[in-house]
Image (cartoon, helix red, strand yellow):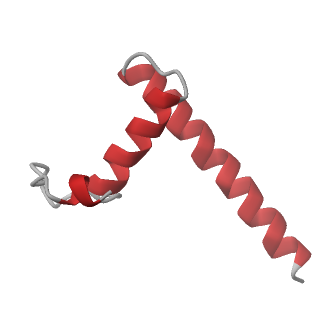
Amino acid sequence: MEVFAQFPDPRKNQGRRFTLVFVLAVAVVCVLAGAKNFREIGDQAGGHRRHAGKQASRSRMASR
């Protein structure tokens, strides 16, 4: 993660949702999990976000 923080972010400020460090870390994890191209990285990353959202909803419901 420290290495990723050294890279300058070439993206414009408008429309950024995630830090470059986070985007690169997710991409590396997806490749380690078997993604072979950008589409597979996007599919895997999107699936994890949906899974995390479901988990957060369940924990909020359980705390009520």
Identify the residue at image location x=32%, y=45%. 24
**Furthest residue in direction front, as rendered:** 3
Quarter occupied by residue 8: bottom left
For the image, the number of numbered tags is 0
Position of the C terminus by quadrant: bottom right
| Residue 2, x across and y down, in percent | 26, 60
Q: Could you tell whether 25 is left or right of 9 in the image?
A: right
Q: Against 38, is 19 above or below? A: below
**Furthest residue in direction bottom, as rendered:** 64
Identify the residue at image location x=86%, y=72%. 61
| Residue 31, x across and y down, in percent | 44, 28
Identify the residue at image location x=90%, y=74%. 62
Along the line of sight, the residue nearer the viewer: 23 or 63: 23
Q: Could you tell whether 30 is left or right of 62 in the image?
A: left
Is residue 15 shown to the viewer in this render? no
Quarter occupied by residue 63: bottom right
Identify the residue at image location x=39%, y=37%. 27
Q: Could you tell whether 20 is left or right of 56 in the image?
A: left
| Residue 49, x across and y down, in percent | 58, 48
Along the line of sight, the residue nearer the viewer: 19 or 14: 19
Position of the N terminus by quadrant: bottom left
Is residue 50 shown to the viewer in this render? yes
| Residue 34, x across and y down, in percent | 52, 21
